[in-house]
């Protein structure tokens, strides 16, 4: 799965990337989708994981994007307007 920040803006500071990636891995683990690798840059993320056969991909994408958006925006005042690209 690959998705980017809104308008591919460099919205995630380098010092927070590992924390964001770990948070994404935790979401997927909670949804029984084992993570192989999470990476990316300040404007997009790459996720390699095993999709639980009982979960539609669209549901997992929506869950990861919405959960991380809420979490990132709640972290510090710096992130109050963070969002992922639509689609």
Image: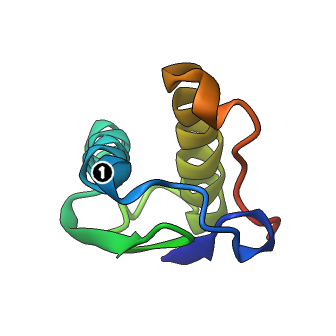
Pointer 1: what residue? Answer: 15
Please tell me which residue is depicted at 60% across the width and 73% down the height of the picture.
3
Residue 48 appears in view: no
Q: Which quadrant: the C terminus? A: bottom right
- The image quadrant that residue 43 belongs to is bottom right
Front-most of 52 and 12?
12
Tell me residue 14's x, y (percent).
Answer: 35, 59
Where residue 40 sits, quadrant-wise, is bottom left
Residue 42 % position (x, y): 48, 67
Local secondary structure at mark 1: helix
Residue 39: image x %, image y %?
30, 72
Q: Measured along the vertical axis of the image, is residue 1 above or below residue 80?
A: below
19 or 26, nearer to the observer:
19
> By what rule are the colours in the image chosen?
rainbow
- Foreground pick, 25 / 7: 7
Q: Is residue 35 left or right of residue 2?
A: left
Image side of residue 79 versus residue 1, left or right = right
Could you tell me which residue is drawn at 60 percent across and 67 percent down?
A: 10
Residue depicted at x 53% and y 49%: 64
> Could you say which is closer to the camera, residue 75 or residue 49?
75
Around disc 1, counting alpha carbons within 10 Å, would you say few (fewer than 14), some (14 to 19), or many (20 or more)?
A: few
At x 70% / y 68%, what residue is drawn?
9
Can residue 12 be seen from the camera position used here?
Answer: yes
Count of labels in the image: 1
| In the depicted structure, whether residue 83 falls above or below residue 77 | below
In which quadrant of the rendered view does residue 53 lie?
bottom left
């Amino acid at each position: 799965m690959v998705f980017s920040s809104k308008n591919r803006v460099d919205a995630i500071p380098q010092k927070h990337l590992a924390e964001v990636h770990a948070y994404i891995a935790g979401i997927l683990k909670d949804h029984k989708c084992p993570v192989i690798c999470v990476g990316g840059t300040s404007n997009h993320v790459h996720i390699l994981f095993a999709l639980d056969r009982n979960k539609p991909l669209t549901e997992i994408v929506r869950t990861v994007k919405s959960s991380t958006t809420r979490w990132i925006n709640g972290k510090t005042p710096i992130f109050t307007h963070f969002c992922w690209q639509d689609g």
